């Protein structure tokens, strides 16, 4: 059946549903296409389920640490992963069902279930339906990558999606990939009672962060009994006595780990390969991402790409901001741009990392005069009182303009506290705005003015 709309929105991740809401609210007739689960990565296999499991793991760790808080020693017992899964699945279902219900009842929005494919400019096929619109918005997300490596087709493995289906606890989980996703799962399952080994090709974990952040993250994880194997330059997979084995050295008989379960946490690939982009003249980049300009417009007239598929951010918050940028330009006559936003992200191990703006390494590479302040969490009263004093705060400032360049807060509450720095950066205020601010005591945030008050020239500090 041929049908004509004002717009077609493909994908129910973070940007799509909100955009449909704004467009229909403006009187547009919208076709909304989703082939699988409403809510996309975040709701179904990303933020929502993993943070639910992080919370369960935190509770398990708290029981294990009872004696540290002056309480009777507790025995945690064996974790029933099926019950953890049941809680997690309930939270996910509530979020997904609410979103699906909202879209289904949205005036002016027609929902189509199936895979969308361009067959001509402004024309998309979904099953037997042919949809026409002058404007098409791609929000198709991404999936876990499984790169080619020796033995990958011979060994059973989990991804960040399929590991969420486990209902029995792994005896020994091997995590290949020492970055954000892999480290979250490593800590979760270690706290549940699994033996855990993390294997990373690079010389250190979370390589996008500064060396000191990476080193502290390693200390945090090793203190909980997680084995870290970095510098694994030649990773290969094999079966040994019916169990997955990971080789970390090209030399015969060298470093290897044998476990019960294997998780490949090696990045994500955009879901653009079956969109029929060639029919509208869009050429993805070498990784499969759809190139966009500062307003998220593609090279094809009337086509925008939002969220993980455009390569301009791989986070829920960047996806939602993509929606805000597109809606502002199209509906509000407000010229918002991707380049206006300040980079910010988190690592949700416990304690978490909140990172905003430039890293110390990036600041040093500019060669411009800069100031830096560092305060260990052992000197943050709230962290000490909570018994969670691992980590540190680090802030960076332009020595001439006094503008804040970036910050890393690795410690309890760091993922929340970093936002007051982010707000000051968006306001383009000098760091003295914070040194002259009064914050609530006792909090983690109250030490942010303090660390900005302890700035020293960057060249006097050790290189990260």
Image (cartoon, rainbow, N blue to C red):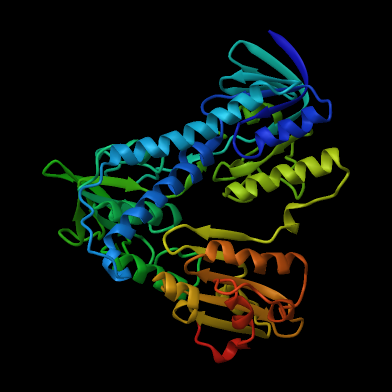
Which residue is nearer to you in this view: 255 or 58? 58
The answer to which quarter of the image holds residue 364 is bottom right
Q: Is residue 243 left or right of residue 128?
A: left
At 43% from the left and 64% from the top, the residue drawn is 351
The answer to which quarter of the image holds residue 253 is bottom left
Which residue is nearer to you in this view: 101 or 367? 101
Residue 386 to residue 84: above or below: below
At 39% from the left and 47% from the top, the residue drawn is 53
The answer to which quarter of the image holds residue 275 is top right
Which residue is nearer to you in this view: 7 or 200? 7
Work out whether residue 115 can be spotted: yes
State the residue lying farthest toward the right. Answer: 333
Quick one: quadrant of the N terminus? top right
Residue 300 image offset from top left, x and y in percent: 75, 35
Residue 215 image offset from top left, x and y in percent: 40, 73
At 77% from the left and 81% from the top, the residue drawn is 401
Residue 124 to residue 360: above or below: above
Residue 132 to residue 208: above or below: above
The mark total stands at 0
Which residue is nearer to you in this view: 90 or 357? 90
Work out whether residue 162 can be spotted: no
Residue 252 image offset from top left, x and y in percent: 17, 58
Residue 112 to residue 378: above or below: above
Residue 107 image offset from top left, x and y in percent: 75, 21
Q: Is residue 326 left or right of residue 145?
A: right
State the residue lying farthest toward the top. Answer: 1
């Amino acid at each position: 059946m041929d049908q004509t709309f004002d717009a077609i929105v493909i994908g129910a991740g973070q940007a799509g549903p909100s955009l449909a809401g704004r467009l229909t609210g403006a009187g547009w007739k919208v076709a909304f296409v989703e082939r699988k689960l409403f809510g996309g990565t975040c709701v179904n296999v990303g933020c929502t389920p993993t943070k639910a499991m992080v919370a369960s793991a935190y509770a398990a760790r708290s029981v294990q640490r009872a004696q540290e808080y002056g309480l009777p020693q507790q025995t945690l017992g064996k974790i029933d992963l099926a019950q953890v899964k049941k809680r997690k699945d309930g939270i996910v279902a509530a979020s997904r069902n609410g979103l699906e219900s909202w879209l289904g009842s949205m005036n002016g929005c027609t929902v189509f279930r199936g895979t969308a494919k361009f067959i001509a400019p402004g024309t998309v096929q979904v099953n037997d339906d042919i949809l026409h619109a002058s404007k098409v918005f791609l929000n198709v997300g991404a999936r876990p990558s499984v790169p080619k490596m020796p033995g990958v087709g011979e060994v059973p493995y989990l991804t960040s999606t399929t590991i969420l289906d486990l209902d029995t606890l792994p005896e020994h989980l091997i995590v290949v990939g020492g970055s954000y996703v892999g480290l979250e799962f490593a800590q979760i399952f270690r706290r549940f009672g699994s033996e855990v080994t993390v294997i990373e090709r690079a010389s250190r974990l979370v390589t996008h962060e500064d060396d000191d952040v990476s080193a502290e993250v390693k200390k945090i994880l090793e203190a909980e009994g997680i084995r870290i194997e970095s510098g694994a330059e030649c990773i290969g997979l094999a079966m040994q006595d019916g169990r997955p084995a990971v080789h970390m050295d090209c030399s015969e008989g060298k470093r290897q780990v044998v476990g019960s379960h294997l998780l490949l946490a090696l990045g994500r690939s955009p879901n653009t390969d079956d969109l029929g982009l060639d029919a509208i003249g869009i050429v993805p980049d070498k990784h499969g991402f759809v190139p966009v300009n500062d307003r998220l417009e593609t090279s094809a007239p009337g086509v925008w790409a939002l969220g993980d598929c455009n390569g301009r951010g791989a986070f829920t918050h960047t996806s939602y901001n993509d929606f805000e940028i597109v809606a502002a330009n199209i509906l509000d006559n407000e010229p918002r741009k991707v380049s206006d936003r300040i980079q910010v992200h988190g690592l949700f191990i416990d304690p978490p990392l909140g990172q905003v703006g430039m890293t110390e390494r990036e600041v040093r590479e500019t060669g411009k005069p800069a100031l830096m302040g560092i305060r260990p969490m052992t000197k943050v009263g709230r962290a000490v009182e909570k018994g969670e004093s691992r980590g540190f705060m680090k802030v960076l400032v332009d020595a001439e303009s006094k503008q804040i360049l970036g910050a890393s807060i690795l410690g309890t509450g760091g993922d929340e506290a970093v936002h007051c720095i982010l707000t000051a950066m968006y306001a383009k205020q000098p760091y003295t705005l914070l040194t002259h601010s009064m914050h609530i005591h006792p909090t983690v945030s109250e030490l942010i003015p303090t660390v900005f008050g302890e700035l020293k020239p960057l060249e006097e500090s050790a290189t990260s």
